[in-house]
Amino acid sequence: MRIITNPLEFPEGDWPALAAGSFRVFAPAKINLHLEILKKRLDGYHEIETLMVQIGLYDALDFELGDNKEERLTCDRTDLSVGEENLIIKAGRLLKKETGTQQGFRIHLMKRIPWAAGLGGGSSDGAAALWGLNHLWKLGLNQKELMSLSAQLGSDVAFFLGSAAAWATGRGEILEPVPALFRCPLVLVKPPMGLSTAEVYKRLKVPEFAHNGSECRQAFEEGDFSKLGSLMFNRLQEPAFEISPTVKRYYEQLQQVPTLGCLLSGSGSCCFALCETHQDARSIAENWSRGLRPDELAAPAQIYVTATLTD
């Protein structure tokens, strides 16, 4: 993540003007190219291994100093909670507790990443809040210190403070950076419904033998996306489809399009497809926007054309 004060540096998209005296931090989404569940831990979490990659779909957070002890979070989506359960608020309170600062903040969240989608938007926002407030309050915490604090917010939060791709183990907090040297075009299909991560895990059957992700990781590092498309794997896909056959039908429709491979991201409900070229990705998105989907899927999906990020 980085602090952006120049509108010319904003990612593509319709972003509102930046107010005087404030700065903006962009929080990327992620996909899981490989996700295996190894066992249930004694602490209630699951032991996992996953290849996570940041993608060019963003939320944005605008920061400015608030009055003494002020904690103000606003959002351009009225259907998203901005209360104390929001990871942005939790990040601010965590930094105050750990550093003793009594400074206030005003943060405005521009929400573009769908939630309950398996794209890590909430975790990314929490990471952006840690990063941005550290800068706003001039706390001087380094990346390692921020990543250590982030574990108190959630398992995926630390990932968004590091490299564009990582091999994650433990409950997701043990990160090994993976070289991200190539941009792979993607189409994301977000069904109108979301899925609860907790409910998906309840349906999970931990396998006797784990699916090895080493070849998937190697293909990603080498930029062999054709091979990568055939090696992608997600243990949570089956229980997610059991909960929502409709999500499964969106996925099956995406499978009918010529791509390098399709997968559910995380616990869903968003599906994605790897494409050979950006033009292929745009063509698929245009066809979907014209309504090329099964008749029984009355509600349109949200369609995004993006790419994996590089370091």
Image: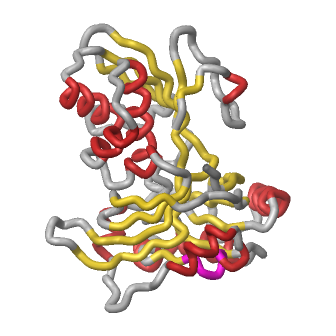
Q: In this view, does 91 lie above or below 118?
A: above
Residue 281 rendering spot, x and y as whole percentages: 77, 60
Q: Which residue is drawn at 80% across and 57% down?
A: 278
Q: Which residue is drawn at 55% across and 58% down?
A: 53
Write the start and end of the magenta stretch as one range.
228-232
Q: Is residue 288 above or below residue 2?
A: below
Task: Answer with left or right where residue 252 lies relative to residue 40.
Answer: right
Task: Answer with left or right where residue 281 lies relative to residue 173.
Answer: right
For residue 231: magenta?
yes
Image quarter for residue 106? Answer: top left
Q: Which residue is drawn at 67% across and 52% down?
A: 304
Q: Main secondary structure of the magenta part?
A: helix
Q: Is residue 144 above or below residue 197?
A: above
How many numbered tags mark residues here?
0
Residue 171 rendering spot, x and y as whole percentages: 30, 64
Residue 113 rendering spot, x and y as whole percentages: 54, 45
- Is residue 44 in view? yes
Image quarter for residue 145? Answer: top left
For residue 82: magenta?
no
Q: Residue at x 23, y 19 (%)?
A: 101
- Is residue 300 in view? no
Residue 243 rendering spot, x and y as whole percentages: 40, 72
Q: Between 159 and 304, which is closer to the camera in this rendering?
A: 159
